[in-house]
Amino acid sequence: MWQTIGQSKALALFEYGLKTGSLAHAYLFVGPSHVGKHTLALEIAQALNCYGTEPPCGECKSCRRIADGKHADVTIISLNSSIGLKEAKSRVEIGIDDIKELQRNASLPPYEGKCKIFIIDGAEHLSNEASNCLLKTLEEPPRGVIIFLLTAEEVRLLPTVVSRCQRVELKPLPGKEIERVLIGSYGVNADNARLLAHLSQGCVGWALMASIDGSYLEQQGQRLSEILSLVDVSWEERFAFVSRIGNDRRLAEEIIKFWLVWWRDLMLAKCGCNQGITNINCALALEEWSQALSLGKIKDFIGSLQESLDRISRNANLRLVFETLMLDMPRKE
Ligand SMILES: [Zn+2]
């Protein structure tokens, strides 16, 4: 009855835990964005509160309310949630108020279900204060409460938080498996399925969203032409691009991660390893660019991009980070 695609190892662990009543009280799901962490956590919440014969049935009132985000005993905390008094918009961390509210809520018995579930999505955004506050609950959670921490960046979590959770790694799926799912279960045509499977880099959730919402591919196209134009333009135009980035850290990280994929593709094309390329719809451009840039310059810029991500995670000034990138970005030879 599980809707989670792939992740057989994690599913087997939870099926056993549900059957024997031996689930842990706190789990840390580690894996890239859109790999299925949120879906799996919600499905376990459904299984624990399900009234059907084969939990999670997905059809009983409880399962449906959880899927619709309306169940009183399933709480999702993320940068976008507005738990507590704070307004959610454009916040950069999950603060101590969110965790205090979690603790208050966790101390009350379930309201409509059998088990209380808290899902902290993007646990790497927990502030230090919030993480320290959460430690006590992770150590001695109230009965009938399970906490799921989801993260794509485990290294940014406090080691003391990590050590108090049972760690479950969700791995990207092989492209062929995603292709099969897109064609078999969602009726996507073979060419599109192959492209989306490649671009998703094993993250089936991204592939599914992109198959129903054309804006994902459109955005990919826009970002690609942005990269291509930046390599050729004057310094003034490069710096004009920086001023358009603004102060949105999440957007900045997203852009740099996207650039990393492109420059990695370029490195692979340069080395003749075309089978590993992600942007398979840009084979010609990659070929042309790989001939115009040396391997050393491509490698150096990949290093700069990785360093930029690291600097952003340590709260560096975004403008400075991007200005440095503009200076480091190689030009066609
Ligand atoms: Zn159910």
Image (tube, grey):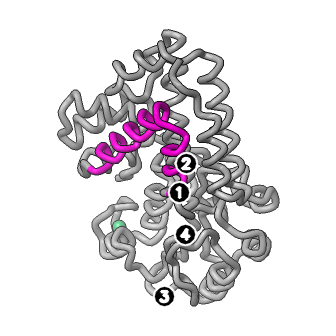
Q: What is the three-letter code of the residue carrying label 1?
A: Ser
Q: Residue at x 44, y 72 (%)?
A: 49
Which SS type dominates the magenta stretch?
helix
The secondary element bearing badge 2 is classed as helix
In this figure, which residue is indicated by the disc labeled 4? 78
In this figure, which residue is indicated by the disc labeled 2? 239
Q: In the drawing, what numbered circle is on residue 39?
A: none
In this figure, which residue is indicated by the disc labeled 3? 111
Q: Is mark 1 within 8 Å of ligand 1?
A: no
Image quarter for ligand 1 equals bottom left
Residue stretch in magenta: 215-243
Q: Is mark 3 within 8 Å of ligand 1?
A: no
* In magenta stretch: residue 238: yes
* Of 253 and 242, the residue lying toward us: 242
The secondary element bearing badge 3 is classed as loop
Give the CA separation, mark 4 to mark 2.
33 Å
* Of 169 and 198, the residue lying toward us: 198
Q: In the drawing, what numbered circle is on residue 243?
A: 1
Give the CA separation, mark 2 to mark 3.
54 Å
Q: Is mark 2 within 8 Å of ligand 1?
A: no
Where residue 33 sits in the image (x, y, percent)?
50, 49
Q: What is the three-letter code of the residue carrying label 3?
A: Tyr
* In magenta stretch: residue 265: no
Nearest to N terminus: mark 2 or mark 3:
3
Give the CA separation, mark 1 to mark 2.
7 Å
- Residues under numbered marks 1 and 4 in contact, where contact means CB atoms less than 8 Å apart: no
Where residue 247 sits in the image (x, y, percent)?
57, 64
Q: Is residue 309 above or below residue 25?
A: above
**Is residue 15 something one can see in this rendering?**
no
Q: Residue at x 48, y 88 (%)?
A: 111
* Of 190 and 312, the residue lying toward us: 312
